[in-house]
Amino acid sequence: MTITKMSWSPQYRSSKFRHVYGKAASKEKCYDCVPITRSVHDNHFCAVNPHFVAVVTECAGGGAFIVIPVNQTGKLDPHYPRICGHKGNVLDIKWNPFDDFVIASCSEDTTVKVWNIPHHLLTTNITDAQKELLGHSRRVGLIEWHPTASNILFSTGYDYKIMIWNLDTKESVIQTPVKTIHFHTDVILSMSFNTDGSLLATACRDRKIRVIDPRAGTVLQEANNKSHRVNKVLFLGNMKKLLSTGTSRWNNRQIALWDQGDLSVPLLEEDMDGSSGLLFPFYDSDTHMLYVLGKGDGNIRYYEISSEKPYLNYLMEYRSPLPQKGIDFAAKQTKGEAVRPAEKNRVAVKETGEFSNLLPGDPTSGWRQRQQRLGGVGWERKNCTESEAACSVMVGERQCRIMPKRGLDVSSCEIFRFYKLIPAKYLIEPVSMIVPRRSESYQEDIYPMTAGAQPALTAQEWLSGSNKGPVLMSLRPGSVILNSLPPLPAKETVLEATEPAQLRTRVADIIEKPSRVQERWGYWKAEERGPEDRKIGLSNGFDVFECPPPKTENELLQMFYRQQEEIRRLRELTIQRDVQIKQLELEIKNLRMDSGRF
């Protein structure tokens, strides 16, 4: 009798990120009473780095945003100073990736401005920008810093142009960009760089995805898929792939995966749901995880990207406890009363100043199209006169922004952090994505080398055609940027001329290559540390910028717990240094024993 052996394979994938979960910050660690903008422009309206949280705010008579120190949580002073140099609404803000105290902003006034943020707490409004970029003829909607070259800024506006600016000049007002790309036929909705910044991907309102050589100003690839209307596009690190979000021909929210070298047909298309809010993708190239957020809902879906089929592997979904937004119409009557039939047809859209006959039940009335054009936002009930039914744009959970990797808390295994804007509650809520681990030690397998705060190229080098990947750094506490370790002192390894050539060669190799202990623990001289490498900690006194003085008993308790955590961290660092010293002493002893043999 022949026995047939059946092979069995599991239906799940093995992944160290399979059980990643989202953890919202407590009320004390949120930013409250923040006047978040209610603009309907499809953008993030927020920018975060390890020192500051910048948020676009409501402002009469121009555009403004505020810059809050990361550690200054709790209620915000209503008279907190603002950066208010624009004459129109601010549409986008981005921190310089290589300088945590420089931020760029663009506005409806057709200008792009670069601001220097003081290292101390703001006391007055800032109205004078460090640099002002004049070149666009219509409002500027997007700006992006180059990922590896310093002082290179990209901007795009409603004049359908992409302008490349070199900020490495002495002029405070720059009127001529170094390059202008003007072959787009409609508004550019999204821009994304590849890892070394040699390619730029754009998503345009003409439903096309383009891969561009920004220095030559030429289109290398172009996608025009009728079944996928693109809104956002994203390079997936070094995987030679693009990811886009948009809608299908049936108006379902959709994500698509593309081969960077061939955009004729997508590798994968996956429908998400039937909601109308835009999808915003965020990709972590270190963990190969993709996070997808919908504008108007509080959920965060996350996936793991692989280089082989099925490419997209669903992991889990973070759900916010806040209720979903809905659509409500109400005239000025008692709370919860129905709208009068005569007033049902005419709706005043106050955010846009337009009037339109909108009937939710009629598919030909343009209801869905209008809602999509407003970014898929919801509506809140708002009192108005009996002769007018009013709709006011309300975004219960408008947008998110992410913290750079060097600002994460590695002791709690945090691999990603979002900052959610909730205008209805005037609240900014941090949400941490955490890998559950029992050990409190540094988890090297989930924290590979990541992009640091040091540029790989100058502006002129990049403009002349050079390409380099980002300068990497380790997230291990006490480590430094890769390749920044100084050589060992020459006087400790100088050999006499009478010593054998074999020993001289061996010691020379030790001088040129840092020891394993140095590579593991990040040993370097204290006097050679840059200002960005010094970690500011709490001491008997406190730094006003890092930790403002407590005003209430609750804030005093928070400061006490923060100091206890700092003491624990310093103890761990001391233990690490002791181990490092012992290892170095052992290496010196071995070196002396080897030299004695000769």
Image (spheres, grey):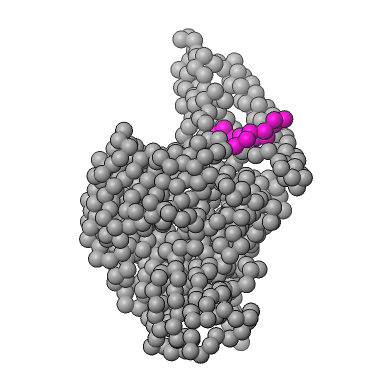
Q: Going by the image, does 195 lie left or right of 551?
A: left
The prevailing secondary structure element of the residues shown in magenta is loop
Report the span colored magenta.
533-545
Locate the C terminus and report the quarter of the image it occupies: top right
Locate residue 125, reporting x and y percent.
49, 42
Give the quadrant of residue 32.
bottom right
Q: Residue at x 68, y 27 (%)?
A: 582
Locate the N terminus and report the quarter of the image it occupies: bottom right
Residue 538 in the magenta stretch? The answer is yes
Q: Going by the image, does 573 lie left or right of 494?
A: right
Query: Is 315 in front, or is 213?
Result: 213
- Residue 439 is at least partly visible in this image: yes
Query: Is 128 in front, or is 514?
Result: 128
Q: Going by the image, does 309 lie left or right of 475?
A: left
Residue 298 in the magenta stretch? The answer is no
Locate residue 352, reporting x and y percent.
41, 69
Give the quadrant of residue 560.
top right
Give the quadrant of residue 551.
top right
Q: Residue at x 32, y 37 (%)?
A: 172
Locate residue 48, reporting x and y percent.
52, 49
Q: Residue at x 62, y 19 (%)?
A: 593
